[in-house]
Amino acid sequence: MKPTARFIVLHPSVHKSGGVGGSVVPSHRAWLAVLALFIFTFAFTIVTTREPATITKNTAAAAGKSKSQLPKPVFDALLHYASANATYSDRMSADEVKAVAAILHSCNTPCNFLIFGLTHETLLWSSLNHNGRTVFIDESSYLVSKLEEKHPFIEAFDVQFTTRVSELYDLMEHYKQEISKECRPVQNLLFSDCKLAINDLPNHVYDVPWDVILIDGPRGYFAGAPGRMAPIFTAGVLARSKRAGGETHIFVHEIEREVERICSEEFLCKNNLVETKDRLGHFVVGQMEANWNRFEFCPSSVSPN
């Protein structure tokens, strides 16, 4: 049992006064001593009873800060909520969501996560990459501004795509002609004039060593849509040009479509495909040394003219 502070009351000594009738008069100094002792004891009691609570609170806060990932129950709950009843075509299936979530949860440190497209899963991705760097890229400046208004903690940017789904084969011909110049696999995208390169993002986005890249936008389901040629090409270059080295996990959603399939095979490579979950392709692409005598994205790919 925890000992409690006790009050000690001292009875002051009295002396018989030589006054009339021999009345007893207490000493003023003795009473002051008793009052001082009472104040000291009261203050000591408050300090000793409050200090343990303060220590416990500070210890708990420190422990919370040291944990970078979400607690497992919260992680699972968010995952279940986002993947349940995914019946609409613009939502990911449960298996697709779990595939991305598993890679995010496996990061030794919080992930650097780049996402092309604002979708039903946007808030989920931001939550699952708790304490990590999460950046969204979308074609709609309106959607980006609304997202930042409602969720100011989310980092998002809009891009004006100049490509069209109907231009797929013309863009692939341009890439083959420029593979040793503007469309090479290792380069600084900020200064690229390749038609497939996204070069107008904020400078710091190109400096981040991205661990995971998800391509789920822009729109690509009709001929006049921007298509995902540029995001797939850009993701391939970012992974190969990664200054910190290491591998980059790249996910391409709706990979069964023509644009996504052809560009993934050309810029992410069949030999880097590790699994497919429903309509989601998962590639792991390693860094490539800036060897100016090599201009292939994939082994036995195209050769410069």
Image (tube, grey):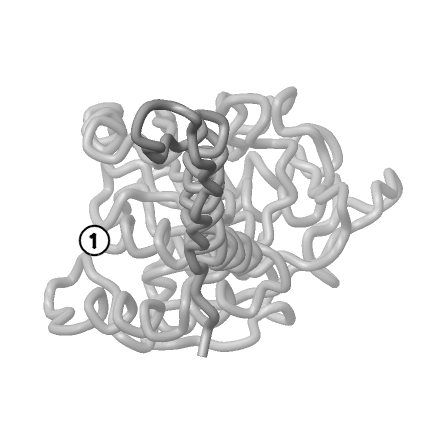
Residue 6 visible to an observer of this rendering: yes
- Residue at 32% x, 24% y is 20
Q: Is residue 262 among what the camera can see? A: no
Which sits in the foreground, 35 or 57?
A: 35
The N terminus appears in which quarter of the rendering?
A: bottom left
Name the residue located 59 percent from the left edge and 26 percent from the top edge. 204
For the residue pair 182 and 176, the one nearer the viewer reads as 182
Left or right: residue 271 compared with residue 235: right
Label 1: how many Cα within 10 Å (few below 14, some 14–19, many 20+): some
- Residue 160 position (above or below residue 55): above
Tell me the quarter of the picture where residue 72 sits.
bottom left
The image shows residue 62 at horizontal and vertical percentages of 54, 53
Instruction: Name the residue nearer the viewer: 247 or 300.
Output: 247
Residue lying at the far front of the rendered structure:
21
| Badge count | 1
Of 21 and 186, the residue lying toward us: 21
Task: Tell me residue 298's x, y (percent).
Answer: 69, 58
Residue at point 65% right, 32% down?
207
Query: Where is 161 relative to 272, above or below?
Result: above
Q: In this view, does 245 lie to the left or right of 237?
A: right
Q: Image point 49% across, 53% down: which residue?
A: 48
> SS of the residue at dot 1?
loop
| Disc 1: which residue | 120
Placement of the C terminus among the 4 image quadrants: top right
Q: What residue type is labelled 1?
A: His
Q: Where is residue 202 in the image (x, y as percent from the top left)?
A: 51, 22
The x and y percentages for residue 296 are: 73, 50
